[in-house]
Image (cartoon, rainbow, N blue to C red):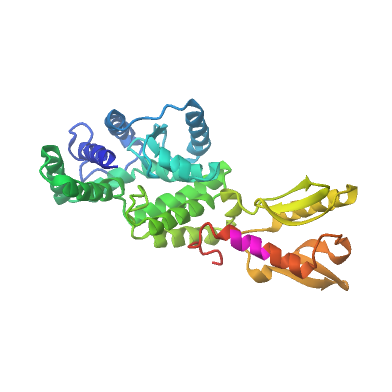
């Protein structure tokens, strides 16, 4: 991480002082006119990064990232070089350079749970590049920042700061460089990213689930550098803003399909057909043609109705035309007369389903599922 921080530091210095690349304070907001300069900066930065940080050559993974990028880029404003590469680093991190080139660390690839979450991180970084946030932020920073950065470079080059000092400086550099965007720019990347995800056919809730879990990792490992998220003290504010944006724009919050939880299936074991949620047995019944059909129908209904955001009272047993019926919100799941041997009383089934939701939520206890 220290090495990457120093490389990113040199890239930012190029952004500030390169005579052929720099933007003056009077430069208008980035537009099509600035694309060539941004791409030149990005290429220079990519050369520096790949000299110092091992690039992972994995044709299958790179093809997957390229496929996702192809779905996202038609919904961005500017035609930049949206090239995505992987570098070897255990910390979950991702960043984009001016001009669109974007890097994922191996730690980030392992951290993300689905293609939707990969798309969310990629989209966030693409928006930073598309909206030229690095250029905007560089212009906002004062000359004092540049002098401080120059001092840090000199200190690390001569090795006079000692191991502890280097660690502190590396942390500071990571804060100032890799995570230098203001909360406003971060929120813009999140919000625009949500829109792009929806247009590209991905689940927009992935922007939320990814941030929620990174926030949890930060709480669990306070001393671990978590890359793009570790240095944002406004992490809760960003999560709340993303959640509000989803709700204000009528976008359903659907976490379970992003993180692959509350998956209901059936299988047959020792002459029984078994209903399973996330690999946990719920109940079973002797297998025959009728129970196979019943359990298959239950699995389909529950996959459509179960959600991490359900309130306990959303699952209830009510009388419909004089018959006890288990419903999830307004969806009928099973009636009393459909119940067969092995299926408990409907009130007990309700409890089993609520317990399954509680178990699924246990993977991220900091997420606010009821807002």
Q: Dominant secondary structure of the magenta stretch? A: helix
- Where does the image place residue 330, in percent across and percent down from the top left? 74, 65
Q: Does the magenta stretch include residue 152?
A: no
| 363 to 26, vertically: above or below | below
Residue displayed at 32% across by 38% down: 98
Q: Which of 350 and 28 is in front in this view?
A: 350
Q: Can residue 280 be seen in this view?
A: yes
Q: Nearer the viewer, residue 65 or 39?
A: 65
User: Which quarter of the rendered picture does the N terminus lie within?
Assistant: top left
Q: Which of 263 and 314 is in front in this view?
A: 263
Residue 112 appears left or right of 220: right
In magenta, the rendered stretch is 354-359
Residue 34 appears left or right of 253: left
Q: Residue furthest front?
A: 270
- Where does the image place residue 17, in percent across and percent down from the top left? 17, 38
User: Image quarter for residue 352?
Assistant: bottom right
Residue 332 appears left or right of 262: right
């Amino acid at each position: 991480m220290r090495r990457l921080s120093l490389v990113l530091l040199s890239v930012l210095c190029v952004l500030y002082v390169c005579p052929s690349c720099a933007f003056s304070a009077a430069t208008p907001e980035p537009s099509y006119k600035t694309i060539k300069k941004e791409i030149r900066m990005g290429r220079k930065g990519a050369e520096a990064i790949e000299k110092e940080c091992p690039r992972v050559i994995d044709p299958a993974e790179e093809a997957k990232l390229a496929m996702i990028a192809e779905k996202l880029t038609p919904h961005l404003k500017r035609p930049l070089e949206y090239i995505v590469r992987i570098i070897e680093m255990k910390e979950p991190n991702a960043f984009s350079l001016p001009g669109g080139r974007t890097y994922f660390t191996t730690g980030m690839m392992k951290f993300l749970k689905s293609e939707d979450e990969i798309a969310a991180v990629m989209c966030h970084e693409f928006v930073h590049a598309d909206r030229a946030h690095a250029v905007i932020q560089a212009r906002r920073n004062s000359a004092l920042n540049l002098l401080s950065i120059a001092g840090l470079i000199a200190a690390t080059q001569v090795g006079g700061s000692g191991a502890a000092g280097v660690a502190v400086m590396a942390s500071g550099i990571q804060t100032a460089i890799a995570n230098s965007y203001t909360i406003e720019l971060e929120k813009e990347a999140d919000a625009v990213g949500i829109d792009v995800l929806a247009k590209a056919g991905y689940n927009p809730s992935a922007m939320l689930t990814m941030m929620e879990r990174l926030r949890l990792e930060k709480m669990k490992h306070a001393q671990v550098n978590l890359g793009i998220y570790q240095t944002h003290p406004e992490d809760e504010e960003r999560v709340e803003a993303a959640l509000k944006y989803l709700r204000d724009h009528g976008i359903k919050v659907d976490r379970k399909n992003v993180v692959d939880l509350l998956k209901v299936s059936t299988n047959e074991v020792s002459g029984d057909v078994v209903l399973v949620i996330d690999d946990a047995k719920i109940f079973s019944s002797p297998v025959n043609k009728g129970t196979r059909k019943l359990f298959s129908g239950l699995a389909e209904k529950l996959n459509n109705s179960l959600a991490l955001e359900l309130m306990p009272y959303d699952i209830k047993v009510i009388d419909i035309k004089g018959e006890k019926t288990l419903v999830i919100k307004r969806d009928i799941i099973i009636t009393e007369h459909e119940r067969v041997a092995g299926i408990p009383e409907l009130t007990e089934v309700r409890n089993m389903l609520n317990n399954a939701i509680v178990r699924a939520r246990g993977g991220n206890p900091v997420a606010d599922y009821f807002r």
